[in-house]
Image (cartoon, rainbow, N blue to C red):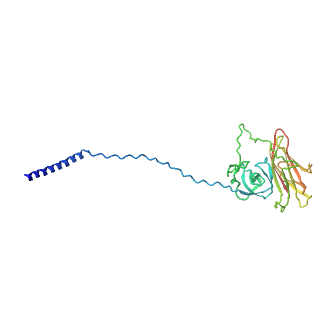
Amino acid sequence: MIPSLLWKLDVLVVALALLAVACSSVALSNGSATPALASPTPAPSQTSLPTSTPLPPSPSATITPLIGKATQTLNVRSGPGTDYEVLGMIQPDTVLVLTGKNETATWLQVEYAAGAGGRGWVTAAYVQTLHGDTASLPVLNASGAPVTAGASAPTSVPVSPPQFGGTPTPTLGPASADKDSSAAPAIQVTFSPAGTPPNYGGTRQFSYTSEVSSPQGDAEDWVMFTPYASLAGSPAEVLFSLVCDGNGKLEVELWQNGAPLAGWGGLACGDQHKPLELTAGAPYLLRLRAATGAGLQYVHYTLTVRNGP
């Protein structure tokens, strides 16, 4: 009895086990699996914008002054033009340190101890550069401030054509007063031979550029010179050249001992190397003035005087 009961219990256990396995298979086939928990979506991180790397500062331009020399006796002025104050004179073959130029490259700024800031201006026509080119010099205004540093100045200034035909003419204004007189000439030059201190090259020639006008403006200029010859009081040949522009006429007088000389031959615009025999060692004055006429009479001129032969 008991063995048969035990056998029945074993069969029941096996049947329950098979039933449990069958139920589990059915549940899986119906997709009743426990859903997985969704992982939290991370918040988007803020993307940093790329920062620009600063460039190293570019080195500032270094202006190397040019070296030149005067080919004639020159006036050193406080600004780039004949209407500026004359600071002094430099002799031929004087070595110059060139530090700038004006916008038309007709005047050069040079190192000059007597000028403001140790600078002065000379006309470019009688300066020879010993190395380099003035095109590399900075362009400066009248006060010495850069305009366009290192830029080349224009070689010509374009002129707009007139509206109604004809040739355009420049607008002339009165000449600026330079406050010279017979007692205080604009320049004073004593000619000398080679080997004479302080300029051992000697002084045989000078040029002076200025302007006069009448009836308004500076009407006259005074220039003093003393001829040289090996024997003081002997005749000395002096050559005169005069170049002019403007709408007026330039009158020239030669003075000595406080009075004009008569019959000396005269000097007119356009004369080149006109010879005149004067007394060596005696000072002379040239009076250059604008002749009167209708309206403003203006003359811009360059006077060159050379002690011959």
Spot the residue most to the top. Answer: 164
Relative image position of residue 111 (x, y in whole percent)? 75, 55
Q: Nearer the viewer, residue 229 or 97?
A: 97
Relative image position of residue 125 (x, y in whole percent)? 76, 53
Picture quarter with the C terminus: bottom right
**Residue at the image point whose x is 73% and y is 55% from the top:** 98
Spot the residue most to the bottom. Answer: 195
Relative image position of residue 15 (x, y in whole percent)? 15, 49
**Residue at the image point whose x is 90% and y is 50% from the top:** 255
Q: Nearer the viewer, residue 125 or 58?
A: 58
Relative placement, left or right, of 294 versus 109 is right
Q: Is residue 45 above or below residue 199?
A: above
Spot the residue most to the left. Answer: 1
Q: Count all numbered tags in the image, as a single digit.
A: 0
Dividing the picture into quadrants, the one containing residue 215 is top right
Relative image position of residue 20 (x, y in whole percent)? 19, 48
Q: Nearer the viewer, residue 126 or 52?
A: 52
Q: Is residue 184 above or below residue 196?
A: above
